Amino acid sequence: MRRELNEKEQAEMSRRGFLKRAALAGAAICVAPTLETVTAAERAIAGETSAATPAPASGMASISEKRTLGSGTAAMEVTAMGFGCMGMSHNRGLHPADKEQIALIREAIDRGVTFLDTAESYGPYTNEILVGKALKEGYRNRILLATKFGHKYINGKRVADEEDSSPTSIRRVCDESLQRLGIDHIDLFYQHRADPNTPPEVVAETVGELIKAGKVRHFGMCEVSVDTIRRAHAVCPITAIQSEYSLMFRNVETNGVLDVCRELGIGFVPFSPINRGFLGGCINEWTKFVPGHDNRQTSPRFQPEAIRQNLRIVEVLNAFGRTRGLTSAQVALAWLMNKRPYIVPIPGTTKLSHLEENLRAVTVRFTAEEMKELEDAVAVIPVVGERYSGAEAAKIQG
């Protein structure tokens, strides 16, 4: 026969229940658990939530702020921060199994993220397949998806020194990406790199035809010059330009790209906003990058001496963030989002703890004086090492 609990025992049970729930929430926020516990803490605490009714647990970071990329018929509203999926299967070392990565992508969406970024070249192909799996069960209808064309492949192998944005290639890549992703249209289709053999007007016209056909919604370009942007935009309105931009690489401020985006009403999407993870403070001169799986291994900027010199920049961010309750990664992301209202960074991660950290940067606001203080402190430290070497560097316009 079941015995009734007295008041003291009931109080103790209540206390234990509270501690258990608190521990679950803390684990989800502070540890990178296996991602069946991703929606994790919230599912353990609040019960199951469906893809259609996300409900982040109280205290967990989420995002609701929106920004508009592009203007007029090319406008596309997304969350102020997106999610870059590349590192989940390409150029960032070993990574968790697909099951955990799918759960993390869905966690980002459950936290409010509406903008995902992938490409046929990530893997190649495997990243699109992974993202496609994550978008099943109702998640596709809650996000806008960007992918890319333009690198040249023969029998699944990249031709390192060549690009291919011929109309035939663009149309083929579009159809193959749609199939891999398991979707009926691409929300934002970027040219990954400029093709010297295909004029930007031809690229824009071809994507414009795909838009008319309903296979693509919006057109974008990556790492291109002001002249290329103007020529392409005159044929098919550009929604977004994607180029590298961070406190360690600010070329778009001086080469006219940010200015032409403002002039033409084009959005700007910085990739590597934390400089390939470096500004997060977890990389040092003893860090080992996995050969063949991490392109930072051969990057001039990630050689031991360059890392040692560049860590001075990370310490500036740490010092700036220390009195504001921010990590160095949060300072780097918040700085970008405070620069222009049409900037939407796409940090990537394979860890729940970093997703939580990144999302908390969205609501940070710096005054003009604080922005100048941070920029001045970083500017006196020379960045050591180029971001690319060899043929890859030669392809960059912007």
Image: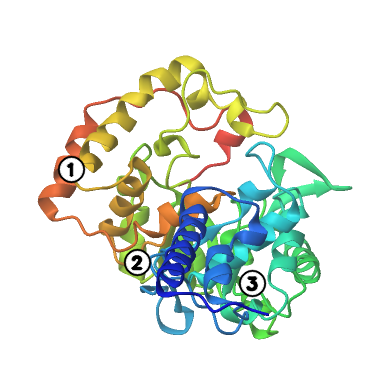
Q: Who comes first in sequence, dot 1 or dot 3? A: 3
* Residue 342: image tag: 2
Residue 196 shows in this picture: no
* Residue 259: image tag: none
Kindly identify which residue carries mark 3. Answer: 207
The percent position of residue 209, horizontal first and vertical second, equals 67, 78
The percent position of residue 76, horizontal first and vertical second, equals 47, 77
**Dot 1, how many residues are within 10 Å of its Cα: few (below 14), some (14-19), or many (20+)?**
few
From mark 1 to mark 2, how far is it between C-alphas? 28 Å
Secondary structure of the residue carrying tag 3 is: helix
From mark 1 to mark 3, how far is it between C-alphas? 48 Å
The percent position of residue 348, horizontal first and vertical second, equals 53, 51
Q: Is residue 132 left or right of residue 276?
A: right
| 176 is higher (above) or lower (below) than 192 | below
Secondary structure of the residue carrying tag 2 is: loop
Q: Who comes first in sequence, dot 1 or dot 2? A: 1
Q: What residue is shown at x 73% (from left), y 75% (from top)?
A: 136
Residue 313 shows in this picture: yes
- Single out the residue that lies furthest toward the left: 369
Nearest to the eye among marks 1 and 3: give it: 1
- Screen quadrant of the N terminus: bottom right
The percent position of residue 115, horizontal first and vertical second, equals 52, 68
From mark 3 to mark 2, how far is it between C-alphas? 23 Å
Q: Is residue 154 left or right of residue 243?
A: right
Depth order, front residue of 324/46 = 46
Kindly identify which residue carries mark 1. Answer: 323
| 248 is higher (above) or lower (below) than 343 | above
Report the amino acid beneath label 2. Tyr
